[in-house]
Image (tube, grey):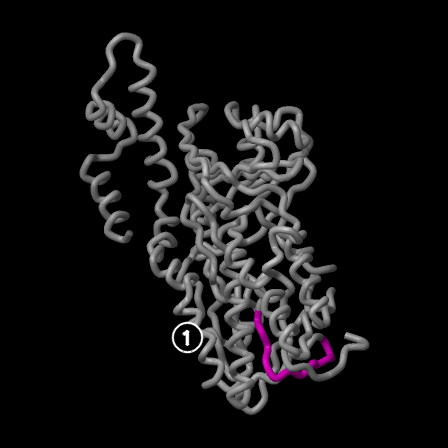
């Protein structure tokens, strides 16, 4: 880290949304802030579908709507259930601008640029090897032989929390708490997107997909419309995928599963003749509150974003970037107040965790706390979509006599080898947790 001064008020590890939000607000408040990023340029390691909820970002950057790299405002939401070539779809037309599509590398770079404009120093291609502890408090970070001292370290290292593991603040990553996201970017052209998805000019679509597109692995698919490209991909539960691979129940590479989704007879019409511009993969959080460290602060340390386990995948939408930004904002505000109270002691930084747990981020994680365990139940991703498709097939594809809805349900349950009692128990367990 040649040329970097040896002491800062705050060192932020990671230039993603959480780290950049904290760095921006702290630099704006006059703090001497250093952002250390392992990738080449901010955002270079980011991978995202993706749709971003705008309101929490506007709390940090009021000029977001005019300045940020927004591709399309999402005005249509779709959810599809798939069994073989058959697809059942629900669509909702939004009445206001809540979320937008973007590529996270672009958005993260914009965020970090804002932090630099506010006075933060960004150094990329730096791997932080250790968060340094002296006399029971954190005093900076080490990269190779170089140490940078700081009064506070903001850990925004992401889902793979190696620094926190070394500190003993989190356990080794549990495969049951994470998923693998894989994505392709397809180049189709701006006008083609609006024509094929029946979208008004400039508007966008977020589309979630459940069923056998994931080859029996708990998870789902996604489709997002960008300016002139389409992002498609899958999110696959790593723990369950490992179990199936070890049991010999699956022998396909994840890229092959994604290719089959792209070539699905129903979905491929939306990107016919498109070129695959990009392929990537990244780990994402599925464990909900189980991924949250026991404490989100220590003397001289706060933990934000994915490193703090702050991501929620409900199956019909994903909240991650906005949670990260909100945590970065709350961390910055707590750090500023800690300094005003006499310094970033453990007692003063406790304020960060207290305020985070009073925020919408924590309320959402608690409200949907059953989702993480639900993601481990294959029934919701295989049999349940299968039952729905079979019911619709019986209702709409009858040659002469149509069954009653009850008959169609009972016949479909029998064909999927699910008893009515099991169905009631499954649905009841979901309702009881709402």
Residue 296 belongs to magenta span: no
Residue occupying the point 45% across, 35% down? 93
Q: Residues within 10 Å of mark 1 (few under 14, many from 20)?
A: few
Image coords of residue 123 (percent x, y) = 74, 69
Closest to the observer, 219 or 327: 327
What residue do we see at 49% from left, 60% from top?
A: 323
Residue 247 in sight here: no
Closer to the camera, 20 or 160? 20
Residue drawn 24% across the image and 11% down it: 401
Q: Secondary structure at mark 1?
A: helix
Image quadrant holding the N terminus, namely: bottom right
Tell whether 378 sits left or right of 145: left
In the image, taking residue 238 as reference, residue 149 lies left or right, namely: right
Seen as rendered, the residue at the extreme top is 400
**Magenta stretch holds residue 153:** yes
Which residue is farthest right? 3
Q: Position of residue 201 (x, y in %)?
A: 60, 32
Q: Which residue is mark 1?
A: 354
Residue 251, percent from left and from top: 51, 39
The kind of secondary structure the magenta stretch mainly shows is strand
Residue drawn 20% across the image and 23% down it: 407
Part of the protein shown in magenta: 144-155
């Amino acid at each position: 880290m040649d040329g970097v001064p040896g002491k800062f008020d705050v060192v932020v590890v990671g230039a993603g949304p959480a780290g950049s939000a904290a760095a921006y607000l702290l630099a704006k408040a006059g703090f001497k802030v250093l952002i250390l990023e392992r990738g080449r340029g901010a955002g270079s390691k980011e991978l995202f579908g993706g749709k971003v909820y705008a309101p929490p970002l506007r709390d940090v950057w009021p000029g977001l709507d005019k300045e940020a790299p927004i591709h399309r405002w999402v005005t249509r939401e779709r959810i599809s259930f798939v069994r073989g070539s058959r697809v059942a779809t629900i669509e909702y037309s939004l009445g206001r601008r809540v979320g937008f599509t973007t590529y996270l590398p672009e958005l993260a770079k914009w965020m970090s640029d804002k932090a630099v404009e506010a006075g933060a120093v960004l150094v990329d291609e730096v791997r932080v090897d250790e968060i340094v502890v002296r006399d029971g408090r954190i005093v900076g970070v080490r990269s190779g032989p170089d140490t940078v001292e700081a009064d506070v370290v903001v850990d925004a290292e992401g889902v793979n929390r190696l620094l926190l593991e070394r500190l003993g603040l989190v356990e080794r990553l549990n495969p049951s708490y994470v998923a693998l996201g894989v994505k392709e970017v397809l180049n189709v052209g701006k006008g083609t997107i609006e024509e094929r998805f029946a979208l008004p000019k400039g508007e966008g679509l977020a589309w979630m997909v459940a069923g056998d597109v994931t080859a029996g692995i708990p998870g789902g698919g996604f489709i997002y419309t960008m300016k002139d490209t389409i992002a498609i991909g899958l999110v696959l539960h790593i723990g369950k995928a490992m179990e199936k691979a070890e049991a010999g129940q699956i022998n396909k590479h994840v890229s092959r599963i994604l290719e089959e989704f792209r070539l699905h007879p129903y979905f491929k019409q939306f990107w016919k003749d498109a070129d695959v511009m990009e392929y990537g993969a990244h780990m994402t959080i599925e464990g909900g509150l189980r991924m949250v460290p026991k404490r989100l602060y220590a003397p001289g340390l706060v933990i934000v974003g994915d490193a703090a386990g702050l991501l929620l995948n409900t199956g019909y939408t994903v909240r991650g970037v906005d949670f990260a930004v909100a945590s970065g904002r709350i961390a910055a505000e707590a750090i500023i107040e800690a300094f005003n109270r006499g310094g970033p002691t453990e007692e003063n930084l406790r304020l960060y965790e207290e305020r985070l747990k009073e925020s919408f981020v924590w309320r959402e994680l608690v409200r949907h706390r059953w989702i993480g365990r639900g993601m481990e139940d294959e029934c919701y991703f295989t049999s349940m979509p299968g039952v729905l498709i079979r019911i619709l097939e019986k209702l709409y594809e009858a040659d002469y006599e149509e069954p009653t809805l009850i008959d169609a349900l009972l016949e479909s349950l029998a064909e999927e080898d699910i008893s009515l009692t099991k169905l009631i128990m499954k649905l009841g367990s979901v309702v009881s947790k709402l």
